[in-house]
Amino acid sequence: MNASETRWLNAEQQRAWRAFIIGTTLLTDTLDRELRQAHGLSLAEYEILVRLSESTGRTLRMAQIAEEMQHSRSRVTHTVSRMEKAGLIERCAAAADRRGVEARMTEKGWDLLVEAAHTHVRGVREHFVDLASDEEFTTMGRLMNSVADHLLTVNPSFADIRSDAD
Amino acid sequence: MNASETRWLNAEQQRAWRAFIIGTTLLTDTLDRELRQAHGLSLAEYEILVRLSESTGRTLRMAQIAEEMQHSRSRVTHTVSRMEKAGLIERCAAAADRRGVEARMTEKGWDLLVEAAHTHVRGVREHFVDLASDEEFTTMGRLMNSVADHLLTVNPSFADIRSDAD
DNA sequence: CTGAGTAAGTTGAAAGTTCAACGAAGCGAG
DNA sequence: CTCGCTTCGTTGAACTTTCAACTTACTCAG
């Protein structure tokens, strides 16, 4: 709480930090809009489909979706409900745990993902990947990875699965 | 629309891209939460105060706020309304343009910003800046800057002020 | 076995954001 | 001047996210 100890950012760091905020805002808004316009799918919904598509049986527990996306469980409930209504996902009781619910991607969801993936990847390339050298992009990836790691470690409420817990 | 032309991301690029999304989500959520808990201020509100504090007369036109933050005008209207209700900002008619509205930071807003800045900067350092070398952080800043530049140039609807328009 | 504690998921209301429509004012060619 | 077009900012409804409360079921020490 001692105000005098705060280490302010220098001018260059400030510029970089603001570039990060604005760039991130612009990038996610753009990718979201492109996906909505072309396929009526939000970025969050798209990413849920991606995760389901990579899972055995194209099925995931609600809690796993929440954790992988770092969304609240409540948010996942609402989003999955909308996607279920749209026929992209089906809910069914989990085999092992009677409290559990599994979300399974439908054929319609799969077909939509197959189309939407083109739009998404092209956007990510055009608006992000192709603007950097491989090395720059890797550096950025490493940095954001350590940010994620740090925040999952530091914050008690995040992380459910920490492989490297002390 | 030709599906076969899509250049997919390789494994490393995919990892970097996902690290970016998760890291960004975690980072902004954390900074937002820290600010809310300590000062009852959202990250967006904080950034509006920062911009006002840097303007002559601690005043900005609504449209300028929207543009600098890349928020919709509607969003700025709503956010400023809430902040006005909280006594952090005052609205007054713009001098030059009778359509215009100027948002001015109140003394209370200033005082809150002075406190909140410590929390914010400490968070940005601890969760981001200090996790990277100066060089890495600069690289990230440059990359995100070119992303912002690209999107402002490419997208007709963004950019209002483009100094380097062709 | 049983009761305390915890985890999974849902719910509905509050808070925040987006969207489309609007009124008011400035701009500019004819 | 004046008609049409654009810009400024607001509005209210629709939509999304958050938040706190809640139900159900699993866990496990005693």
Image (spheres, coloured by chain):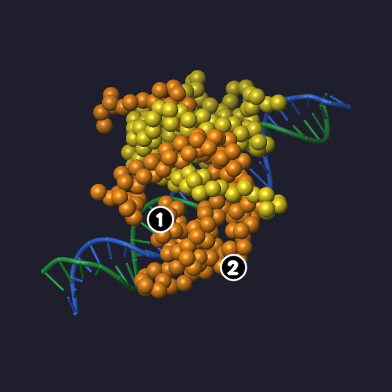
Chain colours: A yellow, B orange, C green, D blue
Picture quarter containing residue A65?
Answer: top right
Side of B94 relative to A81 (left or right): left
Furthest-top residue in this view: A56
Q: Which residue is mark 1?
A: B67
Horizontally, residue C6 falls left or right of residue C10, namely right
Residue at image position (25%, 28%) is B2
Q: Locate residue B149: give its quadrant.
A: top left
Can you give x and y, in whole percent of width and height, for residue B90 in the image?
Answer: 52, 69
The amino acid sitting under disc 2 is: Glu
Residue at point 53%, 26% (across, down)? A60
Q: Is residue A73 above or below residue B118?
A: above
First in residue order: circle 1 vs circle 2: 1
Residue B151, percent from left and from top: 35, 44
Location of mark 2 (residue) = B107
| Observer able to see residue A151 | yes
Q: For this rendering, which residue is in front, A86 or A112?
A: A112
* Residue A98 visible in rendering: no
Badge 1 marks a residue whose secondary structure is helix
Q: Nearer the viewer, residue B119 or A83?
A: B119
